[in-house]
Every structure is written in C-alpha cells, then in structure tokens.
Image: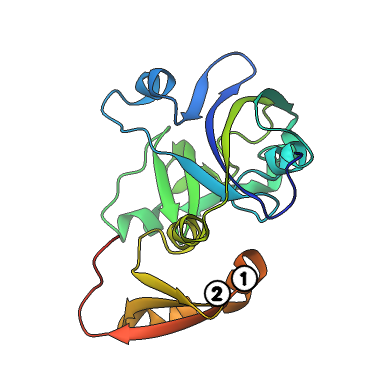
Amino acid sequence: MALQKKDFIEIEFTGKIKDGEIFDSNVKKDLEKLNPEADTKPIIFSLGEGMFLKGIDDFLIGKEIGKYEIELVPEKAFGPRLQQFIQMVPAKIFQGQNINPFPGAVFNFDGRIAKVLTVSGGRVIVDFNHPLAGKTVIYNINILRKIEDTNEKIKSLISFLFRRDFPFSVKDNKVTIEVEKTMSQFVEMFKEKFKDIIGMELEVKEIENPPKTQ
C-alpha cells in the first residue's frame, strides 16, 4: 500500500554529496566513515510533517516500502548558497567571549551555525550558509517498515520534538506526558502540533523530579 502524509515510517539512510562524500547516515558501515565510535540509531518520522528533509518527504509520499535512491538539487535539499549570508563580524565579538577565530573554525551564533572564512585585523568574515548549501545531494533510503503501534508513534514524536524521552500514558484519546515543572510551558506549546500529527489531545502533567526515560 502506498505511503501517505502523516504515516510514520522507520528508515535506514545515507546522505552523500553528488561527488560521493558521505555527510550523514544511520547505516553502520557508512556511519563509521564519519565517526567510528558513533552508534547507529533507528530513524522514525511522520511523512510530510517537517521531521525529515522536505525533498525526501515529497518523494516518499505515494511510494511503497522498499529501497530508493533520491537525487536532490540544492533548492530541494539545503538551499542555494546565498551571498547575503556571508557577513563581517567584528573581531571584538569573539574577543568578548575569549574566542580566537581562525579560517575554518565553526561557531554557534545564537543558534545559527557559521564558518569563519577569513580573519584580517578587526574583521572576521563568516559564512552563515548551511554547509551543504548549493550542493546537489543523493540519499539512499531503505524504508524498513510502516509504524502501526500508537505508543511507538508517540514515543518517536516526543523524541523528535523535545530531543529526549518523557514517560507518557494514553487513555480516552488523550496522551498525558509527565515532565518537570521547568519544562511544562515549553511542552504545552506543541499541543496543536501533537494533535495534528497523532490525532490525540496532549495533556501535560507536572512532576517534582526529572522523569525517567522509557
């Protein structure tokens, strides 16, 4: 049966630049080329919901479970390389943080990743383009299965949205997530997103101690 928007699927994937250089993977033999010590993890996401690269989402909707090679031009991958994203940052910004910028260094500027291109006197030229901007990429995708279990869908969505696991329970078409007080308002912000993808109401239950992962 063809896959549809909002279906949850588990995949193995390897992403590489068209010249063959691998930049991301959860396949052991390919991931080891990036980091020999990294552990492979399953990737589970809901199609068409911004949980994976949009170009991949668009391709997989309507397809069957199986293996695919997908070539994406920059506009459907990580975007074109834009000159306006190459900017000058005063050296004093780095000095104030006791950082010594040098060509090739990568820094996080309020959530934006930038690469230092040149350093000259008090001028530091940095590139805020995505590292893969302007590149055609190829993804080898192996769709392992379609997820049918509701608890597995919820667990994967919680992990995606909050980058951690929270204990949860399901009753009367409602999902109750247990979080510490400091996280409750943040989790509350995703009620509509949660309902849209899972089709259930989200209730947040505050607890005193940090929750244990499931």
135, above or below 195, in the image: above
Q: Is 160 left, or right, of 181 in this rendering?
A: right
Disc 1 residue type (three-letter): Lys
Q: Is residue 205 visible?
A: yes
Counting from the top left corner in percent of width and height, residue 116 is at: 46, 39
Q: Look at mark 2 in the image and give the residue it sits on.
A: 190
Question: Is disc 2 surrounded by few (<14), some (14 to 19) or many (20+) residues within 10 Å?
Answer: some
Residue shown at 53% from the left, 81% from the top: 172
Looking at the image, which is closer to me, 104 or 66?
A: 66
Q: Look at mark 1 in the image and give the residue it sits on.
A: 193
Query: In the drawing, what numbered circle is on residue 120?
Result: none
In the rendered image, the residue lying farthest to the front is 172
In the rendered image, the residue lying farthest to the right is 62
Residue shown at 79% from the left, 40% from the top: 62
75, above or below 69, in the image: below
Q: Dividing the image into 4 quarters, which one contains the N terminus?
A: top right
161, above or below 70, in the image: below
Asked if the residues shown at circle 1 and circle 2 are in contact, with their CB atoms under 8 angstroms apart, the answer is yes
